[in-house]
Image: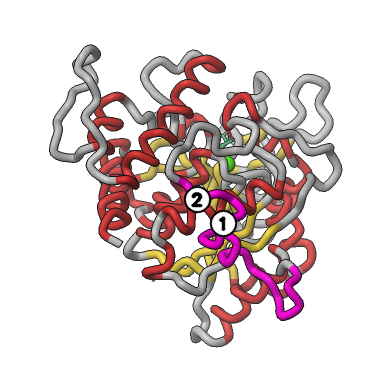
Amino acid sequence: LKHVWLDVDPGHDDATAIMLALHSPNIFLLGISTVHGNTASDWTMRNAARCLHAFGASSRYPGVRVYPGAPKPLLRPAKHDPEIHGADGLGGVEGLPDSESPNVVPWIAKDADGEYIRALDGMAHAVKHTWKRGNGNKTTIISSGPMTNIGLFVAVYPDLLEAVEEFVFMGGGVGLGNRSAVAEYNILCDPHAAQIVLDAPVKKTMIPINVTHTAIVTRAMHARLLDPATHLQDADADAPLPKPITNLRHTLSTLIGFFADSYKSTFGFNDGPPLHDALTVAYVSKPEIFKGTRYRVDIELTGTHTSGETVVDVWNYQACDESSWGPGQKNCIVTQSVDVSRFFDFFHDCVLRCDKV
Ligand code: BDR
Ligand code: CA
């Protein structure tokens, strides 16, 4: 069983990452922190809590909580992405509870005085507790948004890094960007935090857009989500999608539908949207379906045209080795491919388990 902390900015694909983290059989979810990103931090906090309710967290995780984190990047101004995710971060998603509802508010961590317990406190407590009380169990920290919370954790709690198994993050690209020619959104939002994480003496795995752009929810995958008994092919362009067999599937279908429209209008993705953030949880649960190589990775912090780029030294230009995961060394595993069909098998299995709770 892998002990996992999830840091998210929901966000359509972050919501799918939450669903997978709740229902992967070999993951034990310790808690969720939220960060500025796709929308303002107040919304990402509420959206994560809405997802916990909608995805049946109360059955396996009645004690799990959402811990609100940084409302802005370390140095840069906050930069949201309503074009992709709508103003509230989960545009077009039907069937989620209202953000003020009694089904949502209790999922947000509060202390005895009714004050929010913040992301850093939640993470530090979970990592320490898992290490001390769990006979040396280490925590895997997943990041699927800008890395402000994780960078702060690294800076504030260096003594806890020995209890971190790995940082797994969705972000960056190898020679490819999506919010500039070379910068991917999560890294571009807070490049300084990303560099702090890359410098941490802890194993890291990066899931770049080169890989996430292969995990497309095609029409056939969308049909399978609505009703696993139907076997629509991608070529059946004119065949109608089946009706959703459960409310959960309806919710996920509206999520995919909105995300598909965003990706079509903004990036010209005609076959469906990429499930970027879902791949982080898939990687932790099923690393064997990914291929990757260890490289030195740094962030371009000042470039005129390239700020926020992940500089992946694929030709080993810089003298470095694998002696540590720290600065100046091969500090990160960069995934290069995922077995897309096995990823979607995993995704659909989790939806099935989610449906049953
Ligand atoms: C990343 O940016 C956001 O739009 C998604 O949630 C994902 O984490 C992809 O670049
Ligand atoms: Ca995200």
Residue segment shown in magenta: 96-115
The reply to whether residue 280 is in sight is: no
Element type at marker 2? loop
Rendered residue at 69%/53% (across/down): 197
Rendered residue at 77%/20% (across/down): 305
Quarter for ligand 1? Answer: top right
Rendered residue at 60%/62% (across/down): 105
Of residues 255 and 336, the one nearer the viewer is 255
Asked if residue 14 is positioned above or below residue 353 in the image, the reply reads above
Q: Amino acid at mark 2?
A: Pro
Picture quadrant where residue 254 is located = top left
Of residues 284 and 230, the one nearer the viewer is 230
The reply to whether residue 268 is in sight is: yes
- x and y, in percent, of residue 116 in the image: 72, 67
- x and y, in percent, of residue 49 in the image: 55, 56
Check if residue 70 falls in the magenta segment.
no
Of residues 110 and 5, the one nearer the viewer is 110
Which residue does the numbered mark 1 point to in the structure image? 101
Which residue does the numbered mark 2 point to in the structure image? 97
Q: Quadrant of the N terminus?
A: bottom left
Check if residue 112 falls in the magenta segment.
yes
Q: Quadrant of the C terminus?
A: bottom left
Callout 1 environment at 10 Å: few (<14), some (14 to 19), or many (20+)? few
- x and y, in percent, of residue 52 in the image: 48, 58
Q: Amino acid at mark 1?
A: Ser
